[in-house]
Amino acid sequence: MNLDLAKPDPLPSYIYVLSDFLRGQQLFSHLFSSRVSALSFRSTPLRFYLFLVKAELIGWQHIDFGFEWRCTSISHFGMAIERILKDDASEEKGERARMASFVGAMAIADLVKTTLGPKGMDKILQSTGRGQTVTVTNDGATILKSLHIDNPAAKVLVELDISKVQDDEVGDGTTSVVVLAGELLREAEKLVASKIHPMTIIAGFRMAAECAREALLKKVVDNKANEEKFKTDLMKIAKTTLSSKILSQDKEHFAKLAVDAVLRLKGSTNLESIQIIKKPGGSLKDSFLDEGFILDKKIGIGQPKRIENANILVANTAMDTDKVKIYGARVRVDSMAKVADIEAAEKQKMREKVDKILAHGINCFVNRQLIYNFPEELFANAGVLAIEHADFDGIERLALVTGGEIASTFDNPESVKLGHCKLIEEIMIGEDKLIKFSGVEMGQACTVVLRGASHHVLDEAERSLHDALCVLSQTVNDSRVLFGGGWPEMVMAKAVDELARTTPGKRSHAIEAFSRALVAIPTTIADNAGLDSAELVARLRAEHNKEDSNAGIDVISGSVGDMSELGISEAFKVKQAVLLSATEAAEMILRVDEIITCAPRRREDRM
Amino acid sequence: MDKMISTASGEVIITNDGATILNQMGVLQPAAKMLVELSKSQDTTAGDGTTTVVVIAGALLKQCLLLLSSGIHPTVISDSLHKASVKAVDVLTAMAVPVELSDRESLVKSASTSLNSKVVSQYSTLLAPLAVDAVLSVVDPAKPDLVDLRDIKIVKKLGGTVDDTEMVKGLVFDKKVSHASGGLTRMENAKIAVIQFQISPPKTDIEQSIVVSDYTQMDRILKEERNYILGMIKKIKATGCNVLLIQKSILRDAVTDLSLHYLAKAKILVVKDVERDDIEFITKTLNCLPIANIEHFKEEKMGYADLVEEVSVGEGKIVKITGIRDMGRTATVLVRGSNQLVLDEADRSLHDALCVIRCLVNKQFLIAGGGAPEIELSRQLGAWAKVLHGMEGYCVRSFAEALEVIPYTLAENAGLNPITIVTELRNRHAQGEINAGINVRKGQITNILEENVVQPLLVSTSAITLATECVRMILKIDDIVTVR
């Protein structure tokens, strides 16, 4: 229609035309609201008129505020509603709010969807900040963490509970969570469109999630008792995790590396004591695991390069002269000799400090701050190995693994806890010299040295290895294991489908939808590998209808394969976390019926 | 051809070195940035072949585009490329000729191959042996496969021509001897001390001021200052030291005119403003220890050399220390050039040549140059592709075709007809002449090994593996996301 609604006059005729137009269409309320909200009205009376027309059409009981409606327009007409929100604040309600959150969440899910599975794609993250650095990654958590997100629901998906929790606690499965939550919302949207109340959907989802968890629990394998088998399980899990990452080519090597590192921890989940050092050069295959601790620093000139049975003092202290920290303090003297005396006294103080440090009976001194030339020489004379300017992270870890404490005063040698290790020596990795502390107090400590062609590769390798380490350390505690490759999803889907059949009422629709969302994971894995997902998933479903099937998607050969033979395993803990947190997030977004954007805080002009 | 780069700061660089060119270009596009990174990685791994690696990556990407448009899934391409590159490394290793470190001639040959593509190619006969000697002199017999290029110091000095470049057995400082007050410029049988303290009036860390209330005090203060410095110099002289290398100090003057004067009187040669970063290199070379306090000035911390002298070089002067007793495993190369541009390019070229030798020390194999390995790879991989099944064979064939870009580009840049050359090259290789390559000087195909055009195996293999790795990474990308 060609209505020029921007013009205010003559008002009555417009109202007439508009009402005629709307009545002539014999609208349903739904159609009406979408049609009207698509128009943009500038004239306030018109907007209010629309409100009335609509109210008349659908009855006052079901007023849907889906079209553009503002408190201001009402107060214009002298009605008793005051302005509730501030100027810049806005609110979106009902259908629109839900729509906005669905769309946002699904957009995020679609973004990371293509990184899922062993043949998933990578993303370039181009930073708009300084340096315009480029990151290439396959890690869902890294992608989500660095996104600019404006949509509140999408933020929920990224920040509130899923990815970050998933990444911090279980370390892996971040992409799966987001994809599953996205699929759940996609299904929920359809249900909402067919007039099923969100609360009913949520109830259905909850039942389905519980049922899916039960189904998984029935199928778990626990090899805790058999050490040999347990280790192969760990290897399988590590390989499965790594196969979707950059390390996939050398997954055997890295899986072994990660398993060895985690087994050293002896059940603790403190990944702090596994240090990862990145050194460009060489290829990924040259990466290795070393017991002990490696510090990327140099030994002072003229000091021993190798110490056995070292007593280490880790300190954070300034090694220059103690300065008087009062502003404007100065010394007045009346002769040059006295200046020389003061200088000598300063030197003496330094020497005393060094003597105090030496009194601890140490032969290695690591300082976070600079050690200047003079103390360095004193240490060299005493045959003590001194390392200056170690980074903060470095000394904390060093203190942790050698069992020492970081000291900053040296008056009481008895009360300072020294660190110990069997051997300190200088080693060369690639072109760089590093200092290695082996035989440290904390036996589980170890260092993984990553080698690779470029920084991109190294950074990505570190992220991948971190994921693998997290999963493994969790598995050591909770040794229940499942198969991978879409197998758990199919098992869950089957159980959920059965539940849907036996559940009366509307909820069964929601339960059915849940099962469809679960199947989306194997579908995505197949799609990403460039396979015919419709065909494969149908075959998979048929396989799973038999009892005790181990069938999953074998991406390498592009068909349905036996997961136990292929050695593709996943930790139960990861799968459970994926299932539960995706359901929770979907539920949270489903409950939304209003989005209020707060007015931005005004920046005060300081000028 | 060379490129002239004018940097943002108005500086002009003329170079032929791929890594330098790419580094200076302000590349914004993320994938292009990855190629720059690729060139850098090749620089750190092999030091040479920085252009080759980018050219191969570009050719591979071009072939990938064709494969993608014919509907092959990127992961399939990526996996096939990986297989092809592993096979390629095998082929190259099979082609390689082992070389002994004692075989100086072969080492010189490979260094000169690297230098031939540079601006300074006419000096390759001089620079190549120099690079070989420098690297061999820092190789530690205890760890024969490790070379730390930081043990080779390159000193650039403007003036003269590249011809005057020399390797110095000892140390070279790009600075004058301090002889403001008539100090010495030559010292035989030198006893050298590296000091990290200052020979100047005392200065405390705490702020101080001297209050003069009487004019007689002024004289006294001056006298005290003189005595203080004299005292220090006497102590130094007492140990028999006659050459002082003084570390630069930011807190106060390392030496004053007064102390220089006394040092000159005490017949001590002084080199001042030595950077702190250089101290380690110097002490390693001189086999001595730095001294941070006058109290610790002892004889055992000093180094000994036959001769320390100041030499006029072009307009400037340098200090040379030669005949060092128990010299550490270091080398110094003095690079000369008629202008800054040539000098810088000579430095870069020499770096490449040093890297080539280092590669050979790491992995003692040589391979022919002049496009021979690439065309041989292309032929063998092409044959292998025919045995493979499915998409894989198709992708490997593309990989083989992409490798032909190297001889093609070589011929094109030499002003030859690339198609004739490449087809003839293919023909010769098919007949079993695996070392046939492009002889750019003669403009025809010859046995390239006989022409002494050789390069380290490591350069070729790392170029292929790194380029493939980079292309695979780019292939797997399906989205560019703008982030914070």
Image: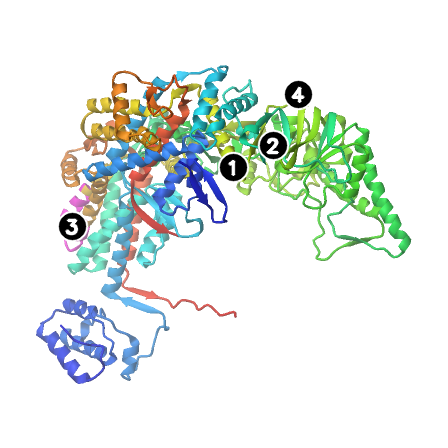
User: Where does residue A400 sit, x and y in percent of width and height?
Assistant: 54, 37
Q: State the mark number for residue B326.
A: 4
User: Where does residue A55 sit, x and y in percent of width and height?
Assistant: 18, 76
- Per the image, the residue denoted by label 2 is A299
Q: Secondary structure at mark 3?
A: loop
Task: Count all numbered tags in the image, as a single digit.
Answer: 4
Whether labels 3 and 4 share one chain: no
Q: State the mark number for residue B344.
A: 1
Labels 3, 1: front one:
1
Rounded to the nearest angstrom, the CA distance separating label 2 from label 4 is: 22 Å
Label 1 amino acid? Answer: Asp
Pointer 2 and pointer 4: residues touching (CB < 8 Å)?
Answer: no
Label 2 amino acid? Answer: Ile
Q: Residue at x 31, y 24 (%)?
A: B88
Label 4 amino acid? Answer: Asp
Q: Main secondary structure of the magenta part?
A: helix
